[in-house]
Image (tube, grey):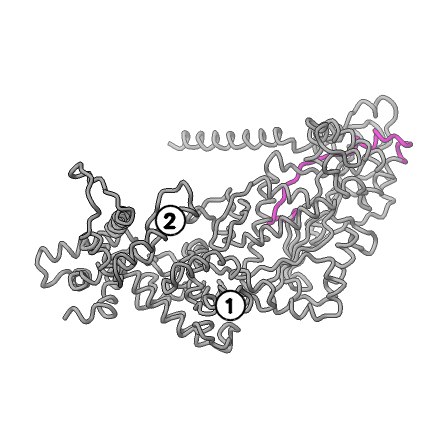
Amino acid sequence: MTEPRDSSISSQIQRIADSVQGAFRTGRRVLSFAEYLQLFEGDPVRHARDACRYLRDVFDHFGTRKADYPWGRFTRWNLFDLPWESAEKDGLSRGALVGQEQVQEEIYRAVSNFAREGRANRLILLHGPNGSAKSTIAACLMAALEQYSLSDDGALYRFNWVFPSTKTTRGTLGFAQGSERGSVESYAHLPDDQIDAKLLVEVRDHPLFLIPVAERQRLLKRAYAARPGADDEGDNDGYGVEPPAEWIARGMLSHKSQQVFEALLASYHGSYKEVLKHVQVERYFISRRYRTGAVTIGPQVMVDAGERQITADKSLGSLPVSLQALTLFEARGELIDAAGGLIEFSDLLKRPLDAFKYLQLTVETGEVALSQQNVQLNCVMMGSANELHFDAFREHVEFASFRGRLDLIRTPYLRSYVQEQTIYDTHVIPQVRRHVAPHATEMAAMFAVLTRMRKPDPDRYPQALRSIVSSLTAAEKLDLYGTAKLPERFDAESQKLLHANIAAIYNEGDSYPIYEGRIGASPREIRAVLLDAAQSPNYSYLSPLAVLSEIEALCENRTEFEWLQQEPLIGGYHDVKQFTEVLMGRLLASWEREFYASTGLVIEERYAELLERYVQHVSSWVKKERIFNRATGAHEDADERLMAEAERLLDEKGEPSDIRPNLIGAVAAWSLDHPNEKLDVAAVFPHYLRRIREAMFAERRPGVAAIARDVVIVIRDKGAGLDAARTRAAEETIERLITRFSYRRQSAGDMASTLLRRRFHDLVV
């Protein structure tokens, strides 16, 4: 009985083995030096990249798209979405970066400048409050480097020294004479049983470093000139538009490789070709786990881990005598591990200055001094720092000397609650593992962003905008940044002026030391709020009411958080008590809209339909034109009764001759800004749409309140005392809440119960 299964397992193993072996061969994993030169000449630009150009190509490889926000249009690099990983929600992977497009653009600018200058001669320092995604940005870059290195375009190569056994060369290792020695083209592909020793080059020297600098530069120029399309490029030192990086053009072998090279050259009496036989070029891959080309250094001075050698290096005893006489030193450490990729100094400024002072000279020269050698570095350096430590660093006497060696990139908290909610939906909710009621993460996101709002300074704006800006509340700013929703209390002209200046308001604090987005609740703190709310004993799911309760508890810890110690200002800024009241009001309003839509007493599509017909008839009325009636097939005058009913619902005061031309003026203004677009009345008159909805709601409140009561009875008391018709209406409402708005019976019941207490208490007994 087990034989077929064993056979199946064996065939699977064989299939996997064939696949791995095939990938190894097609991936050009091991090459001789001559084979590598052929590969290099096929695409010299790709194989002559240093770390900064490689990182720039990673950005370009995964591509970009445009991201539109109320404050402007930005370029988003797809690598920060981690598109190669499975998405959790809304197309985002768990480790993806949400927002921060301006930071992405700044990093790409810095890396591109390194590429143009030929070397990464500055450290990119991301500074911002705790939890503003600085580490996430570095993690995304490292993940993208890792993924890119697996592709053909991202192939990376290093070399090692191999020494064949005496039975292979039929003579003393490294000293075989005549035809016996010359019969072997390279030792790179020898099997392990024919190799006595192999020296790894831990700093990942580029294979081209084996060619003397002068000859290497001539080789590079020839290879670049021979590229397809090279004749169409502008000349730059004979290379083309972008010459090879300084690391490639002038780099030297590491200390150990240079010693081996010189010893072999002497042993072979100057035969360069014989030396190259000992070169084994191998492809390597960037890996965060194995600290290859992607390394993060924590703020501690010493790493809380260690290693010891558990087996003696027997291969060193098999080296040629001339090499055994050398004193070989092996470089080690994070900077060495990061060669060819990216190194992140996490919380750099938490370390004592002496622990990273060497970076001053290192980023300037591209080398790090060790006790026995200077190691030439080939990596992009990135650091992170919170604003508290960065402010202290600015005051330090050494800051001036560091400033020219740093590329400073501010990384604030997000100020769009839509983006903030995406963080929680993507990174937190998968860990909750229970039903998440609608609006739970929305309430958390709105609260977090409200704590980050900064009162605008009207003196920084033109006279026409000052009174508008000075009256903006924190909640209105929240809507402005999140969805470009304009305060309805402003007239049409003021709304238009405000909308045109959203970007100016958003960017106002860029020049302030205490900029908007520096102080506020961290996503880490709100994460804890959501997880605690999910464990509330009052609910079997994550309820928005539990979230608001946990937020109130969080706000009691005034001594622990800087954002709770801010002085409340007019407009609700820094007023956490008012924030919770605003959020409760918004939650109840959202629940009420959803419940009305679910009862079947109000058909939501009718609002826009009525408004659209009203605009159409007003337009004909103003222009004194007739409207074609599809039902009768005749052209008729504008319907006065329809217009009057709409104006009643809109609660418009004044004479029709005053009201209606103003409406058409707004339509004309929208058409000028949106040529060749079909009129979207909901976009032009969102306040009208809301007024119609509220008017219809008001007329149907008693009926809706009765259904809310019945929903609670059906869910909590199994419909006790209800007749069949009322039970059916309640069940249909519950079903719509579930299918249209993603509630479940328990959360729908709690929603209806809360509405009864807070909104319909005057209508039901």
Is 262 on the left or on the right of 638, as rendered? right
Circle nearer the N terminus (1, 2): 1
Image position, residue 253 (x, y; %): 81, 42
Task: Please give the label number shown on residue 257.
Answer: none
Q: Amino acid at mark 2?
A: Ala
Q: Residues within 10 Å of mark 1 (few under 14, many from 20)?
A: many
Q: Residue at x 54, y 58 (%)?
A: 133
In the image, 644 versus 20, the foreground residue is 644
Q: Tell me, yes or no, if residue 406 can be seen here.
A: yes
Magenta residue check for 520 = no
Which is in the foreground here, disc 1 or disc 2?
A: 2
Q: Residues within 10 Å of mark 2 (few under 14, many from 20)?
A: few
Q: Residue at x 26, y 46 (%)?
A: 624
* Tag 2 residue: 668
Q: Residue at x 60, y 41 (%)?
A: 60
State the extent of the magenta-drawn residues as a range: 266-293
Image position, residue 536 (x, y; %): 35, 67
* Tag 1 residue: 456
- Where 753 falls versus 18 (above or below)? below
Image position, residue 104 (x, y; %): 58, 51
Q: How many marks?
A: 2
In the image, 428 versus 401, the foreground residue is 401
Which quadrant holds the C terminus? Answer: bottom left
Q: Amino acid at mark 1?
A: Pro
| SS for dot 1 | loop
Q: Tell me, yes or no, if residue 165 can be seen here.
A: no
Magenta residue check for 280 = yes
Image position, residue 482 (x, y; %): 44, 58
Q: Quadrant of residue 722?
A: bottom left
Which quadrant holds the N terminus? Answer: top left
Is 61 on the left or on the right of 454, as rendered? right
| SS for dot 2 | helix
